[in-house]
Amino acid sequence: MSETRDLLIELGTEELPPKALSKLINAFEAGIKKGLKEAELDFDKIHAYAAPRRLAVVIESLETRQQDRLIERRGPAVSAAFDSEGQPTKAVQGFARSCGVEVSALGTLETDKGAWLVFKQQQKGAETKDLIGDILQKSLAALPIPKRMRWGNLPGEFVRPVHWLILLFGDDVIPLELLGISSGRTSRGHRFHHPEPITITSAKTYVNQLLEQGYVMVDMAVRQQAIHQQVEGLGEKLGGKAVINQGLLDEVTGLVEWPVALSGEYDRRFLELPAEALISSMEEHQKYFAVRDEDNTLLPYFITICNIESKDPAQVIAGNERVILPRLSDAAFFWETDRKRPLADLQQQLKTIVFQNKLGTVYDKSQRVADLAAKIANQIGGDAELAQRAAILAKCDLVTEMVGEFPDLQGIMGRYYARLDGEHDDVCEALDEQYLPRFAGDKLPRTKTGQALSLAEKLDTLVGLFGIGQPPTGVKDPFALRRAALGVLRIIIENKLDLDLDVLLTSTVERLGEIATVKNCTVEVMQYLFDRLRGYAQEQGYQADVFEAVLAIKPTKPVDFMDRLAAVADFRQLEQAQALAAANKRIGNILRKNDAEQSRAVIDGNLLTELTEQALADKVQSVQTIVAPLLAESNYAGVLTELAGMRDTVDAFFDQVMVMAEDEAVRKNRLALLNQTRALFIQIADISVLQA
């Protein structure tokens, strides 16, 4: 067994971007892993650590050198390596030179296809300490850093200036010059609590030394858990529950090395503002956590995470309370200003906001969406007038002072302002619901008006962008079309709306008129939606072949599509499923090869000469009668259960009947029988796609 040691790599920097810290450390760890794998260096575990001023990895039990390898290169065939006089040809001489040896040093390899000259060499494995520098540099070069910076007159670029580098392999430092820094074993603790250097004893002691000596929680997960617990605990002490937004929690974790939670208070008069506005102001500008009571009502407190244990916390709290006052005062000013005009009066200002150059202004989009939302509302049992009104008001809050300052409040503020204007409750709710779902797993619109508006909004964007030839690419999706497509599917499926995508897309294109210049863009959008539906179905636990079986017949109603998926998934569990899938595949192949022969639409009973084909014809007829009412009720599971009973009859037919009979009339009759048999199954899905 080869010798192993633990390796510590720590890169010390100025404060790293807090929102990017998680992405940076994940990419750093992945780069080191990749480098070690490519170098064929085995290790036990790798741990990644990140704090505002450092990125680090600890690799446990890393091999100290590569394994020795036998290098083998095959050269020319022996028959082509020497001329008639036994002298080496130019080909074999060139091969020997490329290997750095004489022709006489080459060996022979016997294979089934003849003998070949080969070069074999035992290559000694390189020392790990000689490979780590290159692995580290490649990993750093591959980090997702949009814009790198230089500092001083030092060589190299990085996201922030680099001040120290640790490369500790076992007890030894691996010497390396990187970004103008020489490697060592000296780290640094907290900027204020322990600014002195810390000599790291080993990779194993790294985390505890920084924690106990340096006042640095270097493990992001541990640091985040500590923040969460402190914030939660303080919220309870204040008589409520802290509002812990995961995005804010992640950002604060990237801002501090030694988290200390403190709470402050603000004037109760600000509680007259919408809670979302206060929370947004606290989170966006100050990185504070808000506090709610047991009734979900906002309390006049905030919780801040300091990066220091102050000897006088009261002074820190007072300072934060002074800072938050003007922020909340600004929010109050925006609120009062916006309330001076009805939301509907802002509609004309939407003509000055361009949605997309070819698709027009936000005002233009609102008019299209209003017409489409009304139509959708009619189809789902909603109120067309309310849906139309909601669409007209939907984007008006974009020009309010509050949303101008806090863009994440769009829709939310529209709901508040519409309610103050006396709009219908469903209209008010729809202004917020139009953006749902905002992210994967988010809640869906609850009201029919909100559902209609959200669908119309997303469909107009989808069809519009595809219609002008600007669909999303693998890396660019500026209008969030993937999210919009999945939102359309989830709203329809999870609310069980009886909507047809084909009808919806056609209606959307009609409202775009001449703007949609791409012919058949609805076909592209439909395929895009099916691609998103594939991922959604897999998340629901459906296997790929089950999805493909249903997709083969392209049902355009999402709810119907999912019902078919469920039925096919249950069907494939039946004992008869595999045999019937194989039989359907066989039937499909026969019919495809004999397309011209399928002219007979009706089976002629007089031409059914074999008992087994008579039996199949009778079975088809009886099953058709049984499944017709089941299909009318969309009882796909019931249909497939009935079809499963056809296995023995179908198997007997193929065992005893020659489909491609010499008699043309008999042959066409049998093909017609197979056509009707397949038609029974294809009404639900193409089960021939199912895998064994």
Image (cartoon, rainbow, N blue to C red):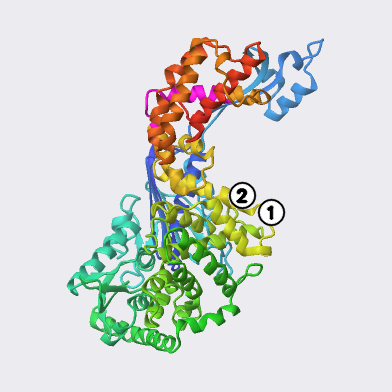
Amino acid type assigned to the residue bearing label 2 in the image:
Val
The answer to whether residue 516 is above or below residue 407 is above
The dominant secondary structure in magenta is helix
Q: Seen in the image, is 25 located left or right of residue 352?
A: left
Where residue 356 sits in the image (x, y, percent)? Answer: 62, 69
Residue 219 visible in this rendered orientation of the protein: no
Is 255 a magenta residue?
Answer: no
Residue 154 visible in this rendered orientation of the protein: yes
**Residue under the point 57% across and 50% down:** 526
Q: Seen in the image, is 367 located left or right of residue 129?
A: right
Secondary structure at numbered mark 2: helix
Q: Which mark is residue 470?
A: none
Disc 2 versus disc 1: distance between alpha carbons? Answer: 9 Å
Quarter of the image for the N terminus: give it: top left
**Residue under the point 51% across and 63% down:** 375
Q: Which mark is residue 519?
A: 1
The answer to whether residue 400 is above or below residue 461 is below
Q: Seen in the image, is 106 located left or right of residue 388?
A: right
Where residue 161 sits in the image (x, y, percent)? Answer: 50, 67
Residue hosting label 2:
523
Amino acid type assigned to the residue bearing label 1 in the image:
Lys
Q: Which image quadrant is residue 672 in?
A: top right
**Numbered marks: total:** 2
Is 583 a magenta residue?
Answer: yes
C-beta proximity under 8 Å, tags 2 and 1 = no
Q: Which image quadrant is residue 191 in?
A: bottom left
Q: Which residues are magenta?
A: 571-588
Q: What is the crowding at mark 2: few (fewer than 14 residues within 10 Å), some, or many (at least 20)? A: some
**Residue under the point 43% across and 44% down:** 562
